[in-house]
Amino acid sequence: MSKKEYKTFDFELSLPYRLAYGPTWTRFFEGLQEEKIFGTKCHQCNRVLVPARSFCPQCFVDIDDWVQVSNEGTLVTWALISFEFYNQPKKPPYAAGLIKLDGADVSMFHLVDGFDMNDLDKVKETLPIGRRVKAVWSEEKKGHILDIKYFQPI
Amino acid sequence: MSKKEYKTFDFELSLPYRLAYGPTWTRFFEGLQEEKIFGTKCHQCNRVLVPARSFCPQCFVDIDDWVQVSNEGTLVTWALISFEFYNQPKKPPYAAGLIKLDGADVSMFHLVDGFDMNDLDKVKETLPIGRRVKAVWSEEKKGHILDIKYFQPI
Amino acid sequence: MGRPVAIIGTGQTKHGNRRDVSYPELVREAVKAAFEDSGITPKDIDGVVSGTMPSMMEGIGMTQFYLGDAMAAVGKPILKTETCGSTGMSIAHTAYYWVCSGEADMVLAVGHEKMREGESQAVMSSCFDPFYQKYFTSGAPGIFAMQCQDWATRYNIPEEKVRDAAALLSVINRDNALDNPYAHIKRKVTVEDVKKSPIISYPIRLLDVCPNSDGTCAVIFASEEKAKKIGTKAAWVKGVAYRGEEYNFGDGDKVEWQSAIQCAKQAYEQAGITHPRKELDLVEIYNPFTFQELLIFECFGFSERGKACDDILNGFYNRDGELPCDRSGGVLCTNPIGAAGLIRVAEAAMQVTGKAQDRQVEGARLALSHALGGVMQFNGLMILGSEL
Amino acid sequence: MGRPVAIIGTGQTKHGNRRDVSYPELVREAVKAAFEDSGITPKDIDGVVSGTMPSMMEGIGMTQFYLGDAMAAVGKPILKTETCGSTGMSIAHTAYYWVCSGEADMVLAVGHEKMREGESQAVMSSCFDPFYQKYFTSGAPGIFAMQCQDWATRYNIPEEKVRDAAALLSVINRDNALDNPYAHIKRKVTVEDVKKSPIISYPIRLLDVCPNSDGTCAVIFASEEKAKKIGTKAAWVKGVAYRGEEYNFGDGDKVEWQSAIQCAKQAYEQAGITHPRKELDLVEIYNPFTFQELLIFECFGFSERGKACDDILNGFYNRDGELPCDRSGGVLCTNPIGAAGLIRVAEAAMQVTGKAQDRQVEGARLALSHALGGVMQFNGLMILGSEL
Ligand SMILES: [Zn+2]
Ligand SMILES: [Zn+2]
C-alpha cells in the first residue's frame, strides 16, 4: 500500500422515510400505549407470537386471534453493550435481552435496565439467565416499541 | 384497499461517508483545479477516455497515458430538467448534456448553462445537437467535478 | 439452454398507494396469490429469490431478511438479487438458473417495492458515485430525455412525429391498464392530454412518465417434471439474456444501444426466433418513459431503425395490432420498481397460458418480457412460450 | 446435484485500510489476480456475479453498476446478490447455479467491501426495520453476545472454560493470519492479551472481534469441460447449501441453530460426508466472533454438543491438529464483509488445489467453507474437493 495520501470525498447522505405499520402493527403499537402487550395465536402450530403479527412465519397462515400476554416474563439471554457507534439508539453501557413473556411462545427483544450497568460483576449477579423481569412503561407513550422503557428484574 | 388510515413511522436516515479517490481520480480532479481536463489513452483500442481512468472498460487493460483534452467540444445530446425532487443537486430549470470534448473519444456528462433556461423554445434554439460548447470554470476550485461550473455554447 | 423450466403460477398485489399494509404484508399478498395460482404450498418450494431496486428505497438496507417470513423463506435457502431497474428480470433469471441447474425443482421469485415510503428520485440518485455522475443524472427523466433527443436527431425523425407517436403510445398503455385489475394508474387520457401535460424534462411530459407505486409480484418457476406433475397450464422459458455496458453514461452509444441489441440477439437465438416482428405474439416492454419504448422497439428488431413512430401511428402495436405491446398497461401505469421487471415476466406468462382475463391477447403463444436498469446500462429479456 | 462445477482460479486484494485506491480500483485488483491465477481472460467469461453487504456501506446504492467496469462486465450479463454477512457465500452459490444450469460455462464471482469508507455499525443497523428490532440489535456484537450466553448456560459450560477456549481460538486465528499475505490484522497476541482486552459486549472483548476491512475477493467458476480444457488444478464443488430462519430474533433458537444444522446436513449429504469431524481436512468458518465459531463447530458436527471448548483446548483445531480451522486467519483477522464469505470459498479452493503457500494444510483434499448473515438468520456452505 502506497504511503502517498490521496484525496477523499466526504459527504453525508440523508434520506427521509414514511413507513406504513399496517393494521396488525398499528394495533400492537396502540396496545403499548395502553400498557398492553399483544400477541397473536397461530391456529396451526398453537404458538402465541409476540409482537403480534398477521401471519405465522413457520406455518405461513393468516392469524388474527389476539391474545394479551403478561407484562412479566423470564430472561432468556442478554448482552451488555459497552461500545459506542455512530447513530447508536442509546448511550452505552446498556443491556439488551430476550424476554419470554408469560403466555408467549417466543421471546421478545428489548432493553433490560433499572439498575447500575457500570459494574459488570454486578450486572452478571443481577441478571442470571432465567431471571424474572417485568415491563417498565415510559411516561409519555407514542405507540412505539420504546413505550416499554425497558424490562426490569423483579 | 381499506379506507382506514393506519399509523406511519417517519424517520430520517443519515449516514456519513469518506470515499477514496485513489491516484487516477486524484490527478484528474487536481487537473480541474488548474483548469485542465485530463483523459487517459488506452494503448489497445487507442481511445482517449475522459474523465481519466486507470483502466479501459472495454479492453480491461491498465492505462496510464495521460492526455490533456480541449476545454471545448461538441454537444452530443442534452436534457432540460424541469422537475424538482428531494436532495436535487441544483434548482430547476437546468440543462444536463453529453459533451464530446475535442481530443476525447467518449463524451463527458455535465451541465450546460450560461443562458436563459426559462423559455423552452429559446433553449431548443440555443442548443441544436452538434452545438459547440466550452467549459466555464468556477472561481473557487476544490478539485471537484463542479470546478467546471458548466459548459456554455460558443 | 439447460433443462426445460416452466412458470407454473404468478401472483400480484393491487399496485398503487398501499399505505393500508406494512411492507411484509404487501409482499405476502402476492406470494399467497402465486401459491393459489399454482396450486402448490410453501412446503413445495426449494428456494426463494427476492429483490428491490435498491433496498434503500424503503430505508431498510437488507430487505431479504425483513421480508423473509413474508416470502415463506423460513427453513429455506434465499437469494437476493438487485440490478437497478432490471432487478425484477434479474430475479427471474436467478430463479431460472437455479431450477435449470437441477439444484432446485421449484423456486419462488419475488420482486417488491414500496416506493411511496421513501423519496424515490433521491434514493435513485444515491445509486451513483458522488464524485461525478450523481450531479448530472437528475433522476431518471433527464437521462432518458437525452437518449430520446439523440435518437430523434440520429434518424432525422421530425419532432412532431416523435411527439405524436409517444403520446399515442401513452394512450395505448393507459387504455390497456383499464383492463388490468392490478394496475396503479387507471385513467383514460387523449393524445391531446399527453401533449398538454406539464414538461418534466423536455421532451418528456408528465403523461409520458410512470408513477411511483407500491407493489409486489411473485412468480413460481418449476422443472419440467414438477410442472407436468402439477399439471396446470405452464409457460415455458424459451430464451434468457442480459447485457451490461460501461458505467460512464458518455462512454456508450444509447441509440445503437448495445446492451439492448445484443441481449435480444441472444434471446432470439435461444428461442429460435428469426423474425421477432412476425413471430412474437405480444411484448411486455419495461417502459417507464414513452419515448424510450419507441427506441426499444427498434433495438429489439420489431420496427426498422427510425420507423417505430410510423409503426405505432399505424396501429402495429395496438391491442388488436400485429404486435400488441404492454397489454398490461406496462411500467407506464404501474411502477413498483423492484417488482416491475418481474411483472413483465408474469404478464407474459399469463398471456401464453391464457390467464390474462380482460387483457388476454387471443391465441398468444410466444411473448417477450423485458427490463432495463442503471443509467441505461443494463437490458434483460425472458421469452416465454405456451409449448415446451 | 447438477453437472460438475469447478473453481479454476481465485484472486484477493491485500485487505485492510485501502484508502490508497478508489473502490473500483480495489475491486479490479482482485479480478485481475483471479484472471492471472486461472490463466483466462475477460473474454472467456460468460457472466459476472457481484455483491456487498449492503451496497450502502460505501454510500453508493447500486454498486454493481458503479463497479461493473472493474469486474469486466461490459458486454456481459451481471447479477448482484446481497444477503447480509452471508453475501460472499450467496455470490458463490449464484455463480455455481449459473454454471451448473448450462447457461454459462465460466462465471466470475466478486465479493467486495470498502468498510472503512462508511460508519459500518450504523450502516448495518440500517438493515433492520425501524419499528422494532433496530433499537436492540446494537450492531453485531450485542446479538452474538446473547447467543454465547444462551449456549454456555444451556450446556453448563463454565464461564472460565468458555473464556479460555475463545481466547485460544483468537490466538490460533491470529497466528494463522501471520502466514496469509492478504490478511488485514497481522499481530501476534497471547491468551492473556485477549482476556485483558477491553470489553465490547460481555463476554466479547476487543480481541474476540473482527476488524473493519477494505478488500475484494474474486473466484472463477467453470464447467467440467472448460476446467479440463484449461487444465490447471481445479477445486470441485461437492456440496452447496443455504438456510434461512425467522426474521424476529426471539422466534428461533440460536443454540440448536436450525439454519446452521440443516444447512450442514444438506451439504454433507451432497458431498457424501457422514463423519465431518473425520472426513474434512480443514474448515474455513465465517468467524467474526470467537465465541460464535465455537458454537458453529458444534452445529456443524465437528465437536459434540457442549464440547467445542474441550476440543479447541486440546489442539484439535490447531494448524497441525486433526481439523485445522481458518488457516487463513479467518474473518477474525480480515473482514471486508461482502467479500468475507467468498474469501472462505477462495481459501478452501486454494487449499484443495495446493495453492495456499505458507498456510497450506498438507494433503488437503476436502474443505468446508461457510458464511452467515442477518440477525443470525442465515447460514450457507460450500464444500470443495480436490477430485471431481
Ligand atoms: Zn404457526
Ligand atoms: Zn481500450
Image (tube, coloured by chain):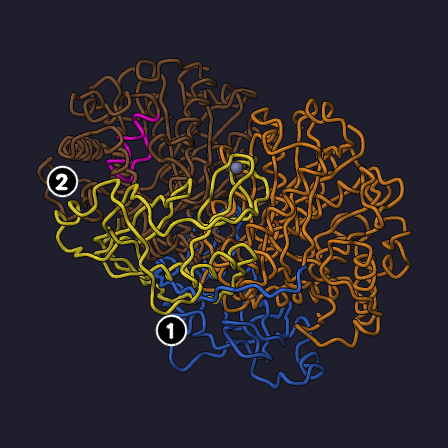
Chain colours: A blue, B yellow, C brown, D orange
Mark 2, mark 1: which one is toward the viewer?
A: 2
> Which stretch is magenta?
C285-299
- Where C146 falls versus A133 (above or below)? above
Q: Position of residue D264 (x, y in %)?
A: 71, 43
In-front residue for pair B147/D136 = B147
In-front residue for pair C379/A29 = C379
Q: Is residue C256 visible?
A: yes
Q: Position of residue B93 (x, y in %)?
A: 21, 56
**Could you say which quadrant of the image residue A2 lies in?**
bottom right
Query: Which residue corresponds to the image point at 87% horizontal and 42% vertical from the top-left?
Result: D278
Crowding at dot 1, Cα within 10 Å, few <14 / some 14-19 / many 20+, comes out as few
Q: Label 1 marks which chain's residue?
A: A
Q: Position of residue B118 (x, y in %)?
A: 14, 56
Q: Position of residue A52 (x, y in %)?
A: 45, 59
Look at mark 1 in the image and give the residue it sits on. Answer: A34
Query: Which residue corresponds to the image point at 43% horizontal and 41% vertical from the top-left?
Result: C87
Q: Is mark 2 within 8 Å of ligand 2?
A: no
Please, what secondary structure does the residue beneath circle 1 have? loop
